[in-house]
Image (cartoon, rainbow, N blue to C red):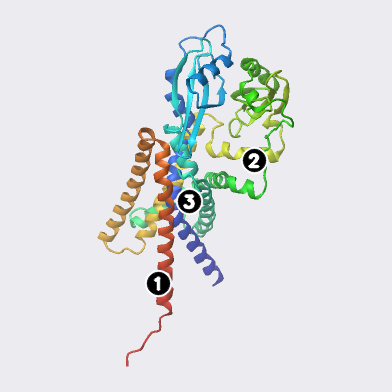
Amino acid sequence: MAAKKSKNLLWKIHQWIGLYVGIVIAVLSLTGAVAVFLPEIDGLSERKYLLDSAGETLQPVSGIVSEIQSKYPKFQILGVQPPQSDLHPLIIDIYKEEAPYDSERYQVFVNPYTGEILGTKDHLNSLSNYLRQVHVRLMDAWWGRQLVGLAGIGLFVLCVTGLLIYGQFMKKQLFGAIRNGINLRVLMADWHKMVGIAALLFNLMIAGTGAWLGLQPVLIKWLDIKAPNAYKRPVKPIKPAEDILQTYDYWQAVALSKNEIPGFIPTQIIPSKDGTNTLEVKGDAGRLPFEPHISKVVLDKSSLEILDVYDIREQAFVDKFYYVQEGLHFGRFGGIFLKIAYALLGITSGVLSITGFFIYLIRKRKTTEEKDQVKKTIFIYSISTVTLIILLALMVIFVGYAYATMLVTPVVYIFLVAFISYQLFLFWRKDKTSKKPIHENS
C-alpha cells in the first residue's frame, strides 16, 4: 500500500511539474540548442570586417579610442577586444544609456594597423543577443533569470522523478524497446522514457547549472557570495576624471599579460574609470570548461606594473566550481563537435515536454476524433511557440530589443497572474463541489 502511494505521488509530481514548467523548458531547449553556436553566429556576421592582409606596425590604441570618442561623444568605452589573429580587427565596445529603455551598445571594428574604422555592429539588436536573452531571461527585464532558474529546478525534479518512475518499468520492458502497433499513446510513452533515460545525465547537468545561473543574482545576494576574481585596488591614486583621460600602452599591456599566464589568450581589456588607474586584461587559458574571460591580469595603467594575476587553473576547487557552471552549460570548451552534441542533446528536454504533454492529453481520449484533436493541439502549440520566437527575433532586429522587452516583460507577468488565478479558481471550485452535501431523493 505504501509503495503504491509512493508511486502515485511520483506520478503526480512528475505530471504537475511537466504541465506547468514544460512550455518554458521547451523554449529553453530550442533556444539553448542554437545558443551554443553564438560565437559561430557572431563570427559569420563579422567576417566582412576581416583584413585583407596584416600590416607591419600596430597603431596606438589611445589614438583610436580618442577618435571613436569624438565620433560618439555620448558613449562610454566598455572595453577593447584584441584581434584574435593578424587578420582580425580590433573591437571597441561602446555603450550609452539615457533612459531604462533607451540604451545603445555598439561594437566598433577597427583596422589595428591603420586605425581605420571598418564598421559597427549593433550589439543589443543582434540575433545573437536576442537568442542569449531569451535563453537566459526569457526577454524579461525584471525577474526573467529567476524564472529560468526555477525552470531549471523543475527540469531537475522531472529527471529524478522520471528515473524513479522508469525504474518500475525496467522489470517488464528492456531499455530502448519501442512497442509499435499497440496505440499512439504507448508509442509516445516508450519514446518519452527512452529519450529521458538516454539524455538523463546531460539534462541533470543542464538543469543544475541552469538553476544556478538563473538564480545566481538572488543567491549571491542572500548568501553574500563574492566573485572569486574580483580584484579591487586598495587605493585610488588619481581622480576619476583623470583616470578616464589617462593614456596607456595597450599593446604592451597585452604582451605583458601573456607572459604572466601560460597559454593566456587576452579577450577583453577594461580600463578603470573610478580613479584606481588600472587595466584589467581578461581572457582564457586552455580549453577548459570555465566561463569566458575569467582568468585575468591587472596592471597599473601608467607604469604597467603587475598588480594581480588570476589563473583559474591554479585556484581552489571552490573557485573552479563557481566558474564552471556557464562553461558546462553552453559547452564552449571542446570544439564544434562537442557543440553539435550539446545541441542534439539539448533538444531532448523539448522532446520530453512535447511527448509528455501528448501522453497527458491523450490518456483519457477514447475515440479516433478525440485522439486526432490531441494531435492538432500539440501541433498548434508547437508551431505557435516556434512562430512566436521567430516573430520576436524579427522585432528585435528590425524594431529594437528595448521595444521587444517592453512588450514581452508585462505579457509574462500578466500571463502568470491570469494563469495562477485561473488554477486557484479551479481548485476552489473543485474543493467546494467535493464538500457539497449529497441529498438523497425521497
**Where is residue 249 shown, x and y percent of the image?**
64, 15
Q: Is residue 300 above or below residue 54?
A: below
Query: CA gap, disc 3 to disc 2?
Result: 36 Å
Give the crowd class for mark 2: few <14, some 14-19, many >=20 residues within 10 Å.
Answer: some
Q: State the residue lying farthest toward the bottom.
A: 442
Q: Which residue is mark 1?
A: 429
Quick check: marks 3 and 1 in contact, CB under 8 Å? no
The amino acid pointed to by label 3 is: Phe
Q: Quadrant of the N terminus?
A: bottom right
Residue at figure coordinates x 59%, y 45% from the top left: 217
The amino acid pointed to by label 2 is: Tyr
Who comes first in sequence, dot 3 or dot 2?
Answer: 3
Front: mark 1 or 2: 1
Front: mark 3 or 1: 1
Q: Is residue 225 visible?
A: yes
Q: Quadrant of the C terminus?
A: bottom left
**Where is residue 223 shown, x and y percent of the image?**
66, 49
Give the crowd class for mark 3: few <14, some 14-19, many >=20 residues within 10 Å.
Answer: some
The amino acid pointed to by label 1 is: Arg
Query: CA gap, disc 3 to disc 1?
Result: 42 Å
Disc sitting over residue 145 in the figure: none
Q: Which residue is mark 3?
A: 175
Q: Is residue 434 above or below residue 383?
A: below
Front: mark 3 or 2: 2
In terms of depth relative to the viewer, which is nearer, 156 or 125? 125
